[in-house]
Image (spheres, helix red, strand yellow):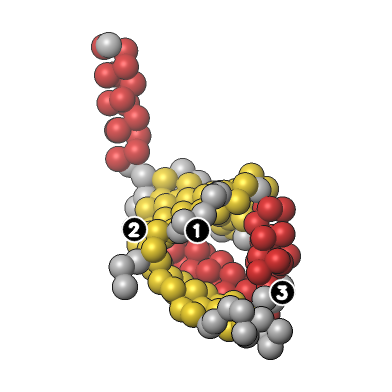
Amino acid sequence: MITILMAGLALDAELGGCGDAASQAEALAAIEAQNAEVQAALEAGDMARYAQVFMEDAWQVSPNSMPLEGQAAIQAHWEGLATLGEWRFALTALDVWVCQGSAIERGYGELSFQPNEAMAADMPAFTASAHYVAHWIEAAPGEWRVRSDVAAAAPQ
């Protein structure tokens, strides 16, 4: 019990020193740039480019869905969705917490869908909003990639 308590205190002390203002700002800028890349790739229908922001073992969880496990599964899923029409994200990072090569982003996003002509009768256009938490890993200095991306539907 004492060993566990001491380990917990040591961990708290170590984490307490994480994330000075400069590293927070650098990580936020890099993550916002990656979010812009995600938005551009999705808008262009380039799902291989979209999936590159995720780590090989990433998870992506959308509201009311099972997790997509792995970069390849994420890419395949979005390639399938791209056949239905145009998808767009508008992502807003609300804050980022950084510690030793790991970052947690809390944000808000809107996903818009416009069906292609073949799907228009079966699937209407829509916009949905969600709050999300993304766990980022610094794969190389200044290069952040998503390990976990979890979204929860925002109240309408």
CA–CA distance in space, label 3 to label 2:
43 Å
Q: What residue appears at the point 61 percent right and 79 percent down from the top-left corner?
A: 122
- Amino acid type assigned to the residue bearing label 3 in the image: Thr
Label 2 SS:
helix
| SS assignment at label 1 | loop
Q: Which residue is drawn at 39% across and 63% down?
A: 153
Pointer 2: residues within 10 angstroms few (<14), some, or many (20+)? few
Residue tagged by mark 1? Answer: 62
Amino acid type at image mark 2: Ala
Residue labelled with disc 3? 83
Q: Viewed as shown, does residue 145 lie left or right of 63?
A: right
Pinpoint residue 90: horizontal percent, then vertical percent: 48, 76
Compared with 64, 114 (above or below) is: below
**Between disc 1 and disc 3, whose residue precedes?**
1
Q: 12 and 65: which one is in front? A: 65
Q: Residue type at mark 1? A: Ser
Report which residue position mark 2 lands on: 21
Q: In this view, does 6 lie above or below 76?
A: above
The residue located at (48%, 47%) in the rendering is: 102
Lower sequence index among marks 1 and 2: 2
Q: Residue furthest bottom?
A: 117
Horizontal and vertical percent for residue 2?
A: 26, 11
Disc ID at residue 34: none
Residue 92: quadrant of the picture: bottom left
* Left or right: 54 as drawn, with respect to 15: right
Which quarter of the figure is the N terminus placed in? Answer: top left
Q: Which of marks 3 and 2 is in front?
A: 3
Q: Who comes first in sequence, dot 3 or dot 2?
A: 2
Front in this rendered view, residue 141 or 35: 35
